[in-house]
Amino acid sequence: MPHTSRLHVPRPPSRPGEAPDFGYVRLSPAGAVARPDVAASAADMESLSVDLIRVLDDEHRAQGPWNPRLDVAELQVGLRYMLLTRVYDDRMLKTQRQGKISFYMKSTGEEAVAVAGTMALRPTDMLFPSYRQQGAYLVRGSALVDLMCQLLSNTRDMCKGRQLPVMYHSVPGRVFSISGNLATQFPQSVGWAMAAAIKGSDDLASSWIGEGSSAEADFHHALLFASVYRAPVILNVVNNQWAISTFQGYAGGEQRSFAARGPGYGIPGLRVDGNDFLAVYAATAWAAERARRGAGSTLLELVTYRAAAHSSSDDPSRYRPRDDADRWPLGDPVERLKQHLIALGEWSEERHQALAAELDARVAAAWKEATTYGTQTDGPRLDPDLMFEDVFKELPQHLKEQRDDMHRGRG
């Protein structure tokens, strides 16, 4: 009897009204995954693309060979940056709901991805983030006021009104401009890393995209060039399970891990607990050392969960259970690092609440200052002439005519 082929359509494990189901997430015990030498070949560590690198156990104690053994002061700094990121996110979403900014994207539940992944690098390394790595800007010294002014597109907007909100950059912080065309930063980071190697620098590049963006051709172009030229670059796939309303299975995560795409190109692929600050730090530091030794690139899959909506324009209750973030098996990155410090006797609930209040006041003060440089409804406003600058070395005649027409209209 002839067989009829059938098209397989991935299905999310649970939908609105159903119980959250994370049985598909493959876990490994904390401390159970081996840490290979940074110069080992990709073929000798393929298991790392299947197993999950974890350091913090269920009692919030650090376990195993991936423990980066950070001192308490550095752990407290990491907690501060993660909590500041969350307070900033919450405040900015509220301002969007109040109509004070047009758009916003939160990183709730993913703070360790950006904060630990940046702290593990040198200040001279170049970052190529996507739109959910707010913590990277804070670690690299971006002022809250400057980030807020970009959201407001006011007279101190770093992008001069030319980018969507949350599309920041930082020249002094060495953070490349965010692109709304997803995945473009992957090949750009590889190109930057290749140039650094040609110049004889030991600086490296690190880039982040979501797992949905790994379906773009840019992802594969980046891995091919990174592999062939052994570019000193860390390529991070942030698997937060959802590309807007599309479950990660549609990008191929149902078949194998996203980290497993690395070995196919001859690049180590490490699957990492993205909600474990220590694991993210350790894996990033390992990949950085590998790159600086000339051993080449690393693909990191950071397994996390997008606890909030995709953006201020999204309603996740329409495509997933309302309480699913609370059931995520890898927990909350802020809470886990907080509990780790408490277990060490170096933190307390009282100190945490005091820090949260301090950061909330800091964010409120920054917002008050940012609005003095202009809001969506009140001046001062950006000079319209700015739209004719920074593109051409010499302004073409047709743009000169448009600028003159604008001036006449204003006159």
Image: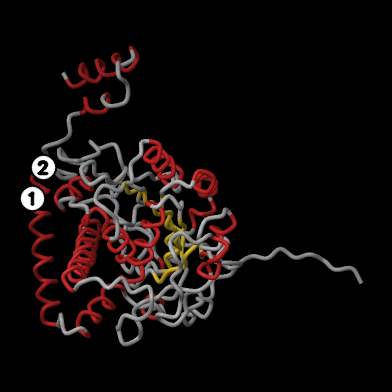
Residue most toward the right?
Answer: 1
Query: What amino acid type should be assigned to the residue bearing mark 1?
Result: Glu
Which residue does the image show at 24% across and 15% down from the upper left? 404
Which residue does the image show at 19% across and 65% down from the upper left? 87
Q: Which mark identifies residue 159?
A: none
Q: Name the residue under label 2.
A: 373
User: Are the residues flagged by discs 1 and 2 in contact, CB closer than 8 Å?
Assistant: yes
Question: Residue 400 occupies which quadrant of the picture?
Answer: top left
Pointer 1 local density, CA inside 10 Å: few below 14, some 14–19, many at least 20: some
On-image quarter of the C terminus: top left
Which residue does the image show at 31% across and 43% down from the upper left? 176
Residue 160 in the image, given as x and y percentages of width and height: 23, 36
Q: Name the residue under label 1.
A: 369
Residue 89 in the image, given as x and y percentages of width and height: 24, 61
Q: Nearer the viewer, residue 185 or 203?
A: 203
Q: Which of 178 and 30 is in front in this view?
A: 30
Residue most toward the top?
Answer: 397
User: Disc 1 and disc 2: Cα gap in Å?
Assistant: 7 Å
Query: What amino acid type should be assigned to the residue bearing mark 2?
Result: Tyr
- Would residue 258 be found to the left or right of residue 334 on screen? right
Image position of 402 with respect to 224: above or below: above
Pointer 2 local density, CA inside 10 Å: few below 14, some 14–19, many at least 20: many
Q: What element carries label 2?
A: helix
Which residue does the image show at 36% across and 36% down from the upper left? 199
- Would residue 361 be found to the left or right of residue 316 on screen? left
Q: What element carries label 1?
A: helix
Q: Which of 282 and 393 is in front in this view?
A: 282
Residue 4 in the image, given as x and y percentages of width and height: 82, 66
On-image quarter of the N terminus: bottom right
